[in-house]
Amino acid sequence: MIDDDLWSAVGDPTRRRMLDLLLAEGGGTATTLSEHLPVTRQAVAKHLGVLDRAGLVHVTPAGRERRYEVDEAQLARAVAQLSAVGATWDARLQRIKRIAERIQRGKAERETGSDHS
């Protein structure tokens, strides 16, 4: 089953970049993240709120700032969902390909058959 809130959270390229940075650095604050992103600290804070509501990050107070770390279990859940969706679409596309090939063979056979009449 697909978690729409989770996919909405990871659907944004800025939030995916933030997750990458948090994973690489072992965590961070809105200020440290904004130093690596082309958005304001306030925009970073809003994005972190979305990631927090989706359960993708844990928040810990750190003085006047809040420190964010990736929830690796929730991220693994997102990856598993993506893999499942990918496998489903691969199967659908294979079925579409087989149907298209049958249609193409049928056309070729009709064209070959009509040449000999």
Image: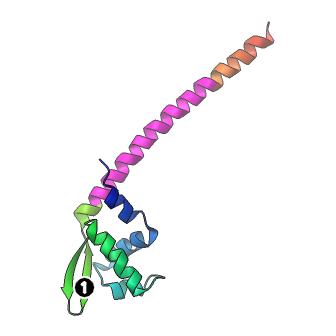
How far across and down, in percent of the image, does residue 61 sit?
A: 19, 85
The 10 Å Cα crowd at callout 1, few under 14, some 14 to 19, many 20 or more, is some
How far across and down, in percent of the image, does residue 76 sit?
A: 28, 59
The quarter of the picture where residue 67 lies is bottom left
Q: Nearer the viewer, residue 79 or 44?
A: 44
Position of 58 compared to 37: left or right?
Answer: left
Main secondary-structure element of the magenta-colored stretch? helix
Q: How is the image coloured?
A: rainbow
Amino acid at pointer 1: Arg
Q: What residue is rendered at 70% in x and 16% in y?
A: 110
The quarter of the picture where residue 117 lies is top right
How far across and down, in percent of the image, does residue 18 sit?
A: 38, 75
Q: Which residue is mark 1?
A: 66
Secondary structure beneath dot 1 equals: strand
Position of 109 compared to 65: left or right?
Answer: right
Q: Nearer the viewer, residue 74 or 47?
A: 47
Is 16 a magenta residue? no
Q: Residue furthest top?
A: 117
The magenta-colored residue range is: 76-103
How far across and down, in percent of the image, does residue 55 sit?
A: 25, 66
